[in-house]
Image (tube, grey):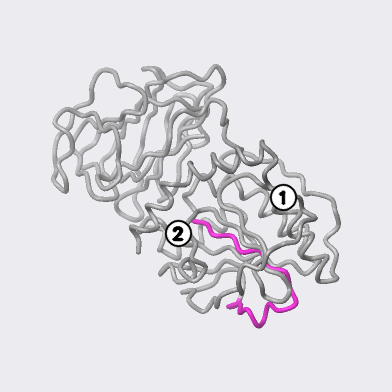
Amino acid sequence: MAEDIRWDRRRFLGTTALAMVAAQLGCIGSAAAQLPMEGDLPSLGGATGWLNSPPLTPAGLRGKVVLIDFWTYTCINWLRTLPYVRAWAAQYKDRALVVIGVHSPEFVFEKNVENVRRAVKDLQVDYPVAIDSDHALWHAFNNNYWPALYVVDAQGRIRHHHFGEGGYEQSERMMQQVLGEAGIGGGDELVSVDARGLEVAADWGSLQSPKNYVGYERTEHFASPGGAAWNKRRVYAAPARLTLNHWALAGEWTVEAQTIVLHEAHGRITYCFHARDLHLVMGPAARGTAVRFRVCIDGKPPGAAHGRDGDDQGNGTVAAQRLYQLIRQPKPIADRQFALAFLDAGVEAFAFTFG
């Protein structure tokens, strides 16, 4: 099950690229088109818990238009859609639209309800959230992507879906049309959003670095001499310079299937990337601890290129299992040598993403 989910997410960029081309060529139908029937809203009974709401059911939602949003809280692609989902929930709340976020985890720590609860609070997600830690709802919808939107009409029928980022105007027009069909009326004005921080859209024109996991099951372009020793403590060295989209370790680490774990202070991760933003999903290996870090870019403190989770000297702290924005650089965007040094032991990292 988990392997299928991971593989589908690895297909995401290709799907997004096809959608972007279709939009540019005018291949996406107009909002006034007849919407298809894509099946009935499945049972939500497989949720292992709920936040911001008592458990919801298809029967109880009959007469409402429902927007189902599949997400996981460390997914940068979902985070960049959140301003729109949040705005839709507020704009159409009084017009019988119910937004339900289905939190289907990718990484093991995302199954921890307290982690999800903290993310819901920090990200200002105030609409109902179904906890889908066993991926029961994921499979009930036959879903393959984070993020994924499904629009359900007042009779409980799925009428529209969208996978990945973008398509915001089309999705909102679909919601307005379905609200109109129900005699409720959704209006014709579109929401306006002011995205900040992690939620800002990617700089697609300069993005040349794809997501890369660091666990041995799915990583690519690992450049430390001798390769990775699976599930064994080993002292690694990093090359003096890396080629684009290659990465390396220095210090004593264990490379596991989904993660890498640092055993001694002053270990480093280095990466050559080409993007405005660099993020790393990571956290302390032991709950309740904190690990200090320092970022360098091209051998210097990041200055104006620092991300929201570090200062201009590159200093920051890992205190929770989440996505950290380490670089947001001004133009010009070019190949950069990134280095992340940990001043303490006990950090684990999962995946790099870019924007």
Q: Amino acid at mark 2?
A: Asn
Which residue does the image show at 77% across and 69% down from the upper left?
96
Residue 117's place in the image compared with 235, above or below, is below
Q: Amino acid at mark 1?
A: Gly
| 39 inside magenta stretch | no
Q: Is residue 195 left or right of residue 245?
A: right
Q: Is residue 28 left or right of residue 176?
A: left
Distance between the alpha carbons at the discs numbered 2 and 1: 39 Å
Quarter of the image for the N terminus: give it.
Answer: bottom left
Upstream in sequence: badge 2 or badge 1: 1
| Residue of label 1 | 29
Residue 63's place in the image compared with 118, above or below, is below
* Magenta highlight range: 54-72
| Residue of label 2 | 115
Q: SS for tag 2?
A: helix
Instruction: Kindly tell me whether residue 266 is visible in this rendering.
Output: no
The x, y position of residue 185, in whole percent, is 85, 64
Mark 2: few/some/many CA within 10 Å (<14, 14-19, 20+): some
Q: Is residue 282 left or right of residue 168?
A: left
The x, y position of residue 343, in whole percent, is 30, 34
Instruction: Kindly tell me whether residue 32 is visible in this rendering.
Output: yes
The x, y position of residue 225, in whole percent, is 16, 27
Which residue does the image show at 42% across and 30% down from the upper left?
315
